[in-house]
Image (spheres, rainbow, N blue to C red):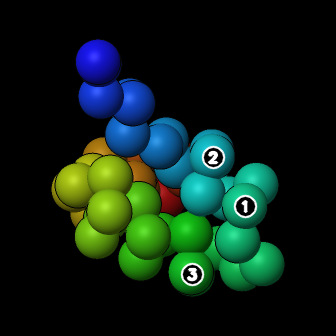
Amino acid sequence: MQRASPKTLQDWLAELPSRDEAIVAAHRYSHMSLSEIARALDL
């Protein structure tokens, strides 16, 4: 059995009601760095 791929930031953004919650979830659960998240959001 293979592990599921971690959710992307876009997955979190679609699933959660706010961008801030999506950022926290991507960082905490998908182990994305804050730099990666900032680049994905063009910040």
Q: SS at mark 1?
A: helix
Type of the residue with mark 1: Glu
Q: Nearer the viewer, mark 3 or mark 1?
A: 1
Within-10-Å neighbours for mark 2: few <14, some 14–19, many 20+: few
Residue depicted at x 32% and y 63% = 29
Whether residue 5 appears in this view of the structure is yes
Q: Position of residue 2 (x, y in %)?
A: 29, 19
Residue depicted at x 76% and y 55% = 14
How many angstroms separate mark 2 from mark 1 (CA)? 6 Å
Q: Which mark is residue 36?
A: none
Type of the residue with mark 3: Asp
Type of the residue with mark 2: Asp
Whether residue 35 appears in this view of the structure is no
Residue depicted at x 78% and y 78% = 17
Residue depicted at x 41% and y 76% = 24
Query: Quick one: label 3 or label 1, which is nearer the N terminus?
Result: 1
